[in-house]
Image: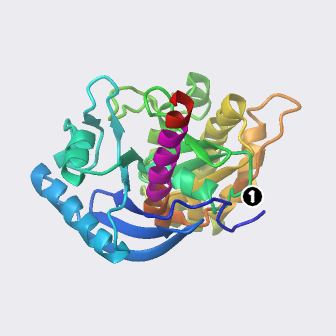
Amino acid sequence: MMNSEPAHEGTGMGFHGIDIGGSKIELVAYKDDGGLAEVHRERIATPGTDFDAFVQAVVALVQRGDAALGRRAPAGIGLPGIIDSATGRQLSSNVPALNGRLVVSALQEALQRPVAIGNDCQCFALSEAQGGAAQGLPSMFGAIIGTGAGGGYCVEGRLLRGLNGIAGEWGHWPVPAALLIQHAVPILDCPCGRSGCMERYVSGPGMSKLHAHFGGAGDAPLAIAARAQAGDKIAEQTLAVHLDLLGHALATLVITLDPHAIVLGGGLSQLAHLYDRLPGAMRRHLFAGVQTPPILPPRFGDAGGARGAALLARQLLEDQALNQTRTA
């Protein structure tokens, strides 16, 4: 498998990739010469409660990135949460200042340039599809398992976002009642407003909740894995149930999208046993004759957020140019 940048003619310009999180905003300015070459990187604290301060902080970052590139560059932005397709308002964000706001239009007006916005999970997937762990594959799914569970689906190195822009939100699929009963775990409410969402069980906090439910102390995932390796029965049970639920979720991804690879991201991507045992856990939930795709560790990991956002900006310009050609 190749891990170089994908072939690309380049645009003769640069791109800003901006990764926005609850505690920090990171901008990386890239020169586009067929690949992405980093020119400038800067990280600041996220203005979490003041929307005007948030917008001005992004503008200031982009201006300094422009100066480093020597040009005004399009910006790709990875935001937590989703955008309401009917109203354009930000939902489920872990940045309180953004909740319920028209973030896209505000940033476009303030930046006065092409702006592409996706969620952080989609940016991760795009980064791993282009030059990352899934480089050169016809399709891939990037599955983030960290404080939450989400992802993105890429075909031929391009992100597919769907009608509502939420393609890849596997963490909000419901856990089947049969599995909840089999493992004697409760139905947990989810901040999305529904109950029994997969994210509540397979994310990092979800694994800790399982550990507490089975009689443990609710340790962090890496500590649970270490306890299981040392022979702790509660930790072993926690990992077994977590693996079965996660295996079901990823098996459903295979049935639905049939990706050529699944790249794991987020904090739980550090758990070595997932790469060895997930294929078997998935096969238990697949019918005969269906192969499991490779389960791969990320190449860029957390560093892929800004990179994926920049790639999203490049994809936006390519789509606009293609549409202009079609209508000419």
- Report the residue that reaches farthest toward the right: 289
The vertical placement of 83 against 178, above or below, is below
Q: Few, some or many C-alpha atoms within 10 Å of disc 1 (few <14, some 14-19, many ≥20)?
A: few
Does the magenta segment cover residue 318?
A: yes
The vertical placement of 171 against 57, above or below, is above
Quadrant assignment, res 74: bottom left
| Residue 149 shows in the view | yes
User: Horizontally, is 212 left or right of 68 in the view?
Assistant: right
- Given residues 217 and 53, the one toward you in this image is 53
Q: Secondary structure at mark 1?
A: helix
Q: Amino acid at mark 1?
A: Asp
Q: Looking at the magenta stretch, what is its main secondary structure?
A: helix
| Residue 231 shows in the view | no
Q: Residue at x 32, y 57 (%)?
A: 20
Q: Position of residue 100 (x, y in %)?
A: 20, 35
Q: Position of residue 77 (x, y in %)?
A: 36, 53
According to the image, label 1 marks what residue?
Answer: 276
Which image quarter is the N terminus in? bottom right
User: Horizontally, is 227 left or right of 14 in the view?
Assistant: right
Q: Residue at x 28, y 48 (%)?
A: 94
- Given residues 233 and 168, the one toward you in this image is 168
User: Horizontally, is 33 left or right of 30 in the view?
Assistant: right
- Given residues 13 and 172, the one toward you in this image is 13
- Given residues 246 and 76, the one toward you in this image is 76
Q: Magenta span covers which residues?
A: 309-322
Q: Residue at x 83, y 40 (%)?
A: 291
Q: Position of residue 118 (x, y in %)?
A: 41, 45
Q: Residue at x 61, y 50 (%)?
A: 237
Does the magenta segment cover residue 131?
A: no
